[in-house]
């Protein structure tokens, strides 16, 4: 199949813009009209699973880290997440009744495939979440869940990431429902929020100019810190990864609460701090960390919703307003400003957005 940029300057811009559509596609494959979650084949019996091990590389590993919050909080299943290159050499013991989940856009990443093979033959159910259904990882799994993102050309993953998140969220809901820890009614609420996700993401994409202005400011920085708490912590990682991959600005992610255990020593007027903080149950905690940054002349870019910005935008350097969303789905939405911030910073710096130096789309060697 030939893919072109469809009028966009870069594949990455096109792929960011495609997200409402492809997430809608993924939802239509996994949700019945009645709101039941459909898995291929026999699916998985989550009542027989005591824990989940999730393994991936790069952006896909942050999808796993996000899913850990969903599986633990909604489905009450303990989850371990590891990057494949560590997992495969760690010789981890794997108790019975563990589900091993491998997430990979390409389905060909060498370390992820090796980690999968480590789990094979250790009496586990092997599930993969992939974009390429005929890939090695998909073929070697007991059950492969396609994410329906379509071909992704930009080296920095965008639409595959949000589609991975969508499928993993559906899986967590399925698990929670099967295990009897999510009522029919609560499931229906999550499903209806999910059905609204494409239009909420569209609304986030409309903040493009606001995000471009903030990126203009970031483009002069040498180092950037991203802070998030709870479900926004993996998103802080993903935002930092995107920025370093394509703009070559050094970026680090920290759990907001860890700020005082080290990185606060770095804060001055030269290191912008991007805070991801929807107005949820953890908002006040994150804002108090943000104020510690501002008290030290740190320049803050606050990404939040209207309530959050009304509460806490005084004195910040820039704001980016996101639509409101259910607490559980926050990470999928906040992936959008993370991607656009990196994209516009790279464009402002004139770097090669789609083919960043030294990086490959799919790493099939160790
Ligand atoms: C490379 C790509 C990343 C990707 C990672 C994992 O590093 O540049 O964008 O997240 O590989 O790839 P996978 O295909 O396994 O998701």
Image (cartoon, helix red, strand yellow):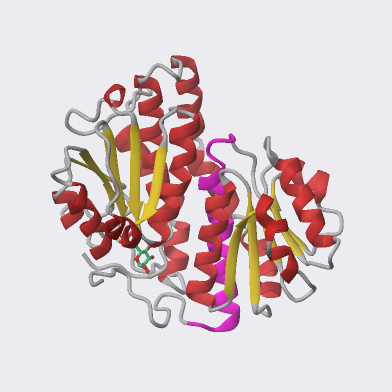
Out of 155 and 44, give the one closest to the viewer.
44
Task: Considering the whole magenta stretch, tell me its main secondary structure.
Answer: helix
Q: Quadrant of ligand 1?
A: bottom left
**Image quarter hosting the C terminus:** bottom left
Instruction: Residue 292: give x, y in percent of width and height.
Output: 81, 57
Q: Which residues are magenta?
A: 326-351
Rendered position, 109 above or below 314: below
Out of 286 and 167, give the one closest to the viewer.
286
Residue at 86%, 54% (x, y): give it: 314
Q: Is residue 337 magenta?
A: yes
- Viewer can see residue 195: no
Instruction: Residue 153: give x, y in percent of width and height.
Output: 34, 68
Left or right relative to 94: residue 225:
right
Out of 143 and 28, give the one closest to the viewer.
143
- Viewer can see residue 53: yes
Rendered position, 43 above or below 20: above
């Amino acid at each position: 199949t030939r893919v072109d940029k469809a009028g966009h300057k870069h594949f990455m811009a096109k792929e960011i813009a495609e997200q409402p559509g492809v997430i809608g596609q993924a939802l239509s494959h996994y949700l019945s009209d009645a709101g039941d979650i459909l898995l291929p084949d026999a699916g998985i019996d989550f009542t027989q699973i005591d824990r989940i091990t999730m393994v991936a590389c790069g952006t896909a590993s942050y999808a796993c880290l996000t899913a850990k919050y969903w599986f633990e909080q909604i489905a009450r299943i303990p989850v371990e997440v590891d990057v494949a290159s560590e997992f495969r050499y760690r010789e981890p013991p794997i108790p019975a009744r563990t589900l091993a989940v491998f997430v990979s856009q390409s389905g060909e990443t060498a370390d992820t495939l090796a980690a999968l093979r480590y789990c094979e033959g250790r009496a586990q159910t092997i599930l993969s979440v992939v974009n390429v259904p005929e890939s090695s990882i998909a073929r070697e799994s007991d059950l492969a869940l396609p994410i329906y993102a379509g071909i992704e050309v930009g080296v920095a993953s965008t639409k595959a990431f949000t589609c991975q998140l969508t499928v993993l969220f559906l899986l967590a809901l399925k698990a929670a429902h099967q295990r009897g820890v999510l009522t029919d009614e609560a499931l229906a609420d999550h499903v209806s929020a999910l059905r609204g996700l494409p239009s909420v993401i569209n609304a986030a994409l409309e903040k493009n100019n606001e995000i471009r202005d903030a990126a203009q400011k970031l483009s002069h920085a040498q180092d950037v810190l991203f802070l998030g708490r709870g479900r926004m912590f993996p998103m802080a990682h993903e935002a930092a990864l995107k920025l370093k991959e394509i703009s070559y600005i050094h970026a680090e992610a920290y759990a907001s609460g860890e700020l005082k255990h080290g990185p606060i020593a770095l804060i001055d007027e030269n290191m912008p701090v991007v805070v991801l903080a929807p107005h949820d149950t953890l908002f006040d905690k994150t804002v108090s960390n943000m104020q510690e940054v501002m008290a030290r002349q740190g320049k803050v870019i606050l990404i939040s919703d209207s309530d959050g910005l009304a509460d806490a935008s005084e004195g910040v350097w820039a704001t980016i307003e996101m639509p409101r969303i259910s607490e559980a789905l926050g990470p999928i939405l906040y992936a959008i400003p993370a991607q656009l911030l990196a994209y516009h910073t790279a464009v402002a710096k004139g770097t090669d957005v789609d083919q960043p130096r030294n990086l490959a789309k799919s790493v099939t060697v160790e």
